[in-house]
Amino acid sequence: MELVEAIQQIYALPMDELDRLVRITERIQLEKNNILIDKDKTAKYIYFLTEGICRIYYPKEQKEAVLDFCFPGDSILSLNSYIHGTPGYEIVDTLENCVLYRIPVSKLQRLYNQSLPIANWGRKLAELETLKIEQRLMQTLFKTAAERYGDLLTKEANVVQRIKLGYIASYLGVTQVTLSRIRAEIK
Amino acid sequence: MELVEAIQQIYALPMDELDRLVRITERIQLEKNNILIDKDKTAKYIYFLTEGICRIYYPKEQKEAVLDFCFPGDSILSLNSYIHGTPGYEIVDTLENCVLYRIPVSKLQRLYNQSLPIANWGRKLAELETLKIEQRLMQTLFKTAAERYGDLLTKEANVVQRIKLGYIASYLGVTQVTLSRIRAEIK
DNA sequence: CATATTTTTTAACAATTGTTAAAAAAGTGA
DNA sequence: TCACTTTTTTAACAATTGTTAAAAAATATG
């Protein structure tokens, strides 16, 4: 998955506009088990993941919850921070060595006020994020943890084995013990 | 709550651009217990509610789930349908007599491709929707039904009495019986 | 105002998940 | 390879919520 591809899959841009975006992106590498986005900090960047796996989670005293896992091609934003320019809630860390591209939010905002296609690209980016979270919410509303674990297995089969059970359990909204019971049932 | 106010609170527009938006809106009234947005239909409009209360819910065989209640000042969109132009999942109905303004999605899309401020307005609309759902998700992840019921009571105190317990229970993700038990605890 | 309908509460029981702790399995590094 | 650490599984018990059904309360209707 390449940067240009990741940008274009959100909203197709004409060459010159695409170039304006690409010119403000930076490529970074981050080793396994490092923090990409920290809570209570104002996010200076939005990211595109091209290699590796990340985890987005909300840390709360005692009880943390995994919002999502990110795979190559995904965009990663600290939502509240990106949208309101205030400190965000979530922590994003790397579960494997990662390659990412980052766009400074301040420069991006400037482009939003200059370029119609890029403003519409930003609109699409937000719209797709909305759908992503809606899907997440609907799954927790309607599917049991067992069903959702099955979905994960079919969608990201080989990947599930690379993620700790505790993280997956948190993503599914159950304890590690319960997920272990679910897996015992399946076999 | 007036239409112009509802539009401007999303993203402030210059007078002439605001006017382009206002000119394509229509005022409608809908009596209590009518369907505003139906599932499996492609939404032709987005709405601003200025009077009354609406309920957004996902209907699933046996088990329906209330996503949100809408109050004056809120915008109402069938997310998937608005974003992808495909049939949506949710039903929106009126819990009281309502006054709404609607914008045809097709005309709105045209403006997105013509006007930079309106494209950015659409971006903000999507961004705010994202945060709304994120809040909803975080509440279900971290707060117990009892806590969330307490939140509802403080935020929309007088309004809660006007909404059926079954709807509120569905919004909180518990059965009506459980919510009844929660209320018995509080008193 | 009295009756019918809807909504809410209460009770008893079943089922599911959480909790704590210990054992087993897998992974890591010298 | 062996010892050590981390992760996963299993077991027993407690706590919470769902289910079903009936009673009570509130609301609507002629």
Image (cartoon, coloured by chain):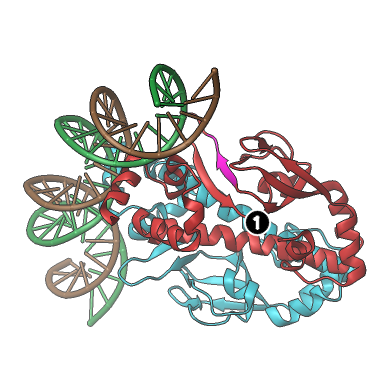
Chain colours: A red, B cyan, C brown, D green
How many marks the image carries: the answer is: 1
Quadrant (top left/top right/bottom left/bottom right) for the N terminus of chain B:
bottom right
Q: Is residue A151 visible?
A: yes
In the figure, residue A85 lies in which quadrant?
top right
Magenta span dominant secondary structure: strand
Magenta-colored span: A54-59
Residue B38 x/y as whole percent = 49, 78
In the figure, residue B119 lies in which quadrant?
bottom right
Residue C7 x/y as whole percent = 29, 61
Q: Is residue B72 visible?
A: no
According to the image, label 1 marks what residue?
A: A72
Residue C27 x/y as whole percent = 47, 36
For residue A7, side relative to residue D21 (left or right): right
Reply above or below: B142 against A9. above
In-front residue for pair A183/B24: A183
Residue A147 x/y as whole percent = 36, 60
**Residue in the image at 62% along x and 81% along y:** B44
Q: Label 1: chain?
A: A
In-front residue for pair A154/A120: A154
Is residue B163 found inside the magenta-colored segment of the image? no
**Residue in the image at 63% along x and 71% along y:** B47
**Residue in the image at 69% along x and 64% along y:** B2
Residue type of the residue flagged with mark 1: Pro
In the figure, residue A165 lies in which quadrant?
top left
SS type, badge 1: loop
Mark 1, other Cα within 10 Å: few <14 / some 14–19 / many ≥20: some
**Residue in the image at 74% along x and 42% along y:** A29
